[in-house]
Amino acid sequence: MNTDLLVTTTEHIPGKEYEVIGEVFGLTTQSKNVLRNMGAALKNVVGGEIKDYTKMLDEARNISVDRLRKNARDMGADAVVMMRFDSGSIGTDMQSVAAYGTAVKYV
């Protein structure tokens, strides 16, 4: 994970003045594979966390934040404020994760 550009869920960065550059996004869509689906089916019977899906979603969140950082750097930003996640299913076997926020430049 690339962390050279600050990404925060807060609106303000203590001690920093900045101007808004614009909205910025990072997106990824991950597909579930056959082995994950079989494991999930078994967990539906016995209950408990589906660790392969949790791992897939964690990876998807990391990828989306990395892409958000890249897009912000490409815009000339120094940081991203008000970062949020959104996710959803596409069909029955794909999961999409979006990281979005506001790119800012220090003044």
Image (cartoon, rainbow, N blue to C red):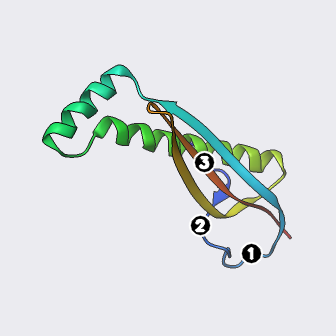
What is the distance, in whole Å, between disc 1 and disc 3 at their CAs? Answer: 26 Å
Coordinates of residue 23 in the picture (x, y in percent): 77, 57
Which numbered disc covers residue 16?
Answer: 1
Residue 2 visible in this rendered orientation of the protein: no
- Indicate the secondary structure of the residue bearing disc 1: loop
- Indicate the secondary structure of the residue bearing disc 3: strand
The answer to whether residue 5 is above or below residue 70 is: below
Say whether residue 10 is left or right of residue 79: left
Nearest to viewer (mark 1 / mark 2): 2
**Type of amino acid at the residue the image marks with label 3:** Ala
**At x 24% / y 32%, what residue is drawn?**
41
The answer to whether residue 32 is above or below residue 44 is: above
Which numbered disc covers residue 85?
Answer: none
**Type of amino acid at the residue the image marks with label 1:** Lys
Q: Residues within 10 Å of mark 1 (few under 14, many from 20)?
A: few
The answer to whether residue 57 is above or below residue 85 is: above
| Residue designated by label 3 | 98
Coordinates of residue 71 in the picture (x, y in percent): 75, 45
Which numbered disc covers residue 9?
Answer: 2
**At x 17% / y 44%, what residue is drawn?**
47
For marks 1 and 3 on the same chain, the one whose residue lies earlier in the sequence: 1
Front residue of 20 and 6: 20
Q: Residues within 10 Å of mark 3 (few under 14, many from 20)?
A: many
